[in-house]
Image (tube, rainbow, N blue to C red):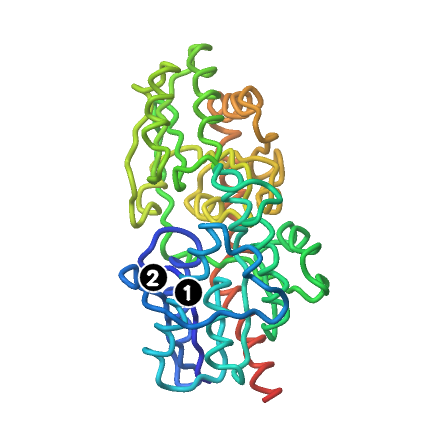
Amino acid sequence: MKLLQALFFPPEQPGGVSSMIPYLQERFTSPRWEMDLFSLPKRIRNKGQEEVQFQTFDWTIYGDSPVVQKYIQTYRDYLWWTRLRIQKPYDLIHAHHPIAGLAMKSVFPDTPLIQTIHSSYERELILNGRIEPNGLEHQFLLSIYGELEHRADRLLTVSDSFRRYLAPYVKHPDRIGIIPNGFDEKRFKPIPHDNAVTQLVTVCRLVPAKGLDILFKACAELKDKGHDYVLHIIGDGPIRPDLEELAQRLGIYNETIFYGYTLHPEEFMPFFDVFVLPSRAEAFGSVFAEAALSCLALVGTEVGGIPEQIEDGINGLLVPPEDPSALAEALEKVMLDPAYRYELARSACEKAKTHYSLGRSVNELKKMYLQFQAEA
């Protein structure tokens, strides 16, 4: 069976699906399966000139927005690159970004398309202060979900929480399947260690949606109580200067280390003690599963797909979003009780191995892919 995995970001890009699919490809290497990856290179800009039309809505009513114009031009570029580069037919296309799926279905209308929606671009833009709720951009991006449902042969997402989020914007939410992201256990090698000072770590893009301002305020409360810790920030993004200034203002700059972008953070994570990320929104939160496989104690917020991974008090701790004091209290619990911290980390690791292994995802995908082959 000839399969195409259509990404938006190239596989070497950080985070989530783009870093997962190459490991998926390795598991499909056999005479029975042939899998290729496809994505849009960063250098491709403003090449596409094709007229864009959607089948379920008129995008031009939102065309005054620069954000919408950029989205449409990126779609044109993806169409142009797809027509230029893909010369052979596939039995099935699995797209992992709305632009990728819509472009593939336009170029190959007779090829079955599975579309996985991994995250909510509109929520990210709202939380990061780039668009207004219910504005032109928001309405446009919500309309894309209906177009995807209309065009794709099967719609998937990564958590029950995100399926509920999508429900108002599609006609048949009950038909949306759920396959969580899978992670190759071989990448994660927990290492026994005993740090004299608790090592906190977070891995994310530095944007407002990740709630790092809340984390910094919680860490300031911990310092005011006399607790020693080091906070490691792995990742980069547009608000890094603001976060560095906030750390200085709160008096925690000496306890905070900014690493910038790191291609393989899983190589560092086993040396830390606690993974913490007070996100304001997460469709799934892949980095929690990665931290769990590194055998770290997990502290997260009660948003999106995070509570599907963390059972509060059993394999991690959950706190309300936007609550620095609750976050500080949760961190204090795992900092002061190493035995409790270890039990949470061990339980998190066991659950991640059971529910979020790459092998499990591969098996579910193979079953689904073969259904399409049987229907052909």
Give percent across and percent down for residue 297. Answer: 48, 36
Which disc number belongs to residue 7?
1
Query: Residue at label 2?
Result: 10
- SS label for mark 2: loop
- Residue at figure coordinates x 50%, y 25% from the top left: 331
Q: Give, as a three-letter code, the residue at label 2.
A: Pro
- Residue 229 in view in this figure: yes
Using the image as rendered, state which of residue 140 and residue 84 is in the foreground. 140
Q: Report crowding for label 1: few under 14, some 14 to 19, many 20 or more residues within 10 A (C-alpha).
A: many
> Quick one: SS at disc 1?
loop
The reply to whether discs 2 and 1 touch (Cβ–Cβ < 8 Å) is yes
Determine the image quadrant of residue 347: top right
Q: Going by the image, does 240 lie left or right of 374? A: left
Q: Position of residue 98 (x, y in %)?
A: 51, 63
- Identify residue type, mark 1: Leu
Mark 2 residue crowding within 10 angstroms, few (<14) / some (14–19) / many (20+): some
Q: Quadrant of the C terminus?
A: bottom right
**Vertical relation: 19 (above or below) 201:** below
- x then y, percent, for residue 241: 32, 29
At x 43%, y 65%, the residue is: 75
Q: Is residue 351 visible?
A: no
Q: In the figure, 10 relative to 325: above or below?
A: below
Determine whether 339 is above or below 42 in the image.
above
Return the x and y of residue 166 as percentages of the image width and height. 65, 55
